[in-house]
Image: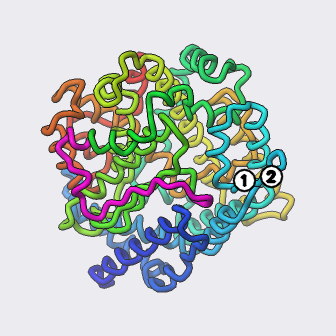
Amino acid sequence: MDLDAYRRSAESFNEELMREYYRHYAGLQDSFEIEAIYARHAGLFTRDSVQALRDLDARATADSDHTGESDHQRRARMLLDFAVEGYVGESTKAVEEQLARAEAEMTIEVGGERIGFREAPVVQANEADAARRVEIEAALLAATRERLGPHHRELIERQHACATELGWESYADMCAYCKRIDLQALSRQTAAFADASAQSYREVLDPELRRTLGTSLDELRRADLPRFFRAAEEDRHFPRVRLIESFVETMRGLGIDVGGQRGVTFDIGSRPNKSPRAFCAPVRVPGEVYLVVAPVGGWDDFATLFHEGGHTEHAANTDPGLPFEFRCLGDNSISETYAFLMQHLVENPDWLARRLDLDDPSELVAHARAQRLVYLRRYAGKLAYELELHGPGAAERAAGGGAGDRDADWGALSRRYSELLGDAIRVDWPTETFLADVDEGFYCACYLRAWALETHLRSHLRERFGPAWFESREAGRVLQALWRDGQRLDADELLGNLTGERLDFGVVLADLGFS
């Protein structure tokens, strides 16, 4: 294999795919034509290419002197992960196009009003009427089950089949190997967090539900969660005109001129088919980076903008001289860490006082703590569920037996999903989203590891530069040095280099005040 040629083609593929992703999910085009992109780079994701990179990874590992992973080993591992993800993507590209097209074209009807499927969660978050939120939720779930369900099922089946074709026992085993993440160990840590936080869950969440929604935890429905996360009662503190300004000012405090960064675009306009899920699209790293937000209003817009702003600054500040693998591949827990670091400023009392002139942010801080606890417990439940969904025997369940047997297996998984997520959040959780609520490649593990790493990094910055570290140019230089390294290191390595500590999810428990 000509590795240099492979890397050039891989970078071109990555750029084309990310640009198509940006244009579709930003609502700039209804089509999501990724099949043509895969066709132009057909040689990247053949079984022979995957095997050649697997052999390269094995040789690099065998040549290790056991003193830590070298850049040669890192690049081999990252290319293997890229090729395996691409092999799966090649198999699923048609169904992904169908899913994207269906989501973009679909509408739901609520009380005689037609609402775009992707727009509906934003409408739901802004809806003060609890009964109407339930109607929107019911329509979304029905559309997911009846119109998207077959696509989601085919997508998962193909993922499982690809893992078997490439010689792994399961999709979970394949992801754990290629990403070098011990998913089972992480699940044990997050399960321990869920157990340890269980007793405090009600006392943290219930007062905030009563204050913001006028309901108790016992009365909470999943349809209420988008409104709860929206934190509409805090809107007066978060005027729309301060949205971009607050981020620019924060970066300026760190010595970073956002306005002077070439190739960074803030896409915050409203469009009917724009994804309600904000994202950063690093088309070229660095050089062409899009920050995409679908405004909901108030505090949620600020939190979302700062999260995606963390991704954007990471990509925009990455050293252009780094190899492709370190600029565009690697452990996404790293970029998510920087995203959470920026996002958590919007619940930081010192930042709220200095940037938005809040004299008493105690209610907002309490709400943010409750919201974060919900998210953490939800993702702990997601990881446990996805290990069952993608674990050993999943491919056989999808391929073996008759249609009735497979339907029974999917039915059992949907009930298990409802049970695990319902236990985590303590609401009746619907079964309809048991395949839609799954990100590819165990991305939930990236979020969980990032929450732990961000806690360490934030503590490190506070200890070195004080509570107002976000106004320290020296802290900005520390962050820019980390950002310049792209994703060369994984989360464990970065933390070890930064503080000498080991990454453990237990640190989040203390950060929430539970130990």
Q: Residues within 10 Å of mark 2 (few under 14, many from 20)?
A: some
**Residue drawn at the location 72% of the way across and 39% of the way down:** 418
Residue 23 at what x, y percent from top left?
Answer: 50, 68
- Of 173 and 143, nearer the camera is 143
Task: Please tell me in which quadrant of the rendered image residue 422 appears.
Answer: top right
**Residue drawn at the location 31% of the way across and 31% of the way down:** 355
Q: Amino acid at mark 1?
A: Ile
Q: Earlier in the sequence, mark 1 or mark 2?
A: 2
155 on left or right of 504: right
Do the residues under discs 1 and 2 have CB atoms within 8 angstroms? yes
- Of 204 and 162, nearer the camera is 204
**Residue 118 appearing in the image:** yes
Q: Is residue 214 above or below residue 420?
A: above
Residue 26 at what x, y percent from top left?
Answer: 52, 61
Q: Amino acid at mark 2?
A: Glu
**Residue drawn at the location 62% of the way across and 21% of the way down:** 209
406 on left or right of 224: right
Q: Secondary structure at mark 1?
A: strand
Q: Residue 115 — which label?
A: 1
Residue 330 at what x, y percent from top left?
Answer: 34, 58
Name the residue beneath numbered marker 2.
Answer: 109
Q: Is residue 55 above or below residue 170?
A: below
Task: Please tell me in which quadrant of the rendered image residue 316 appears.
Answer: bottom left
**Residue drawn at the location 54% of the way across and 54% of the way down:** 270
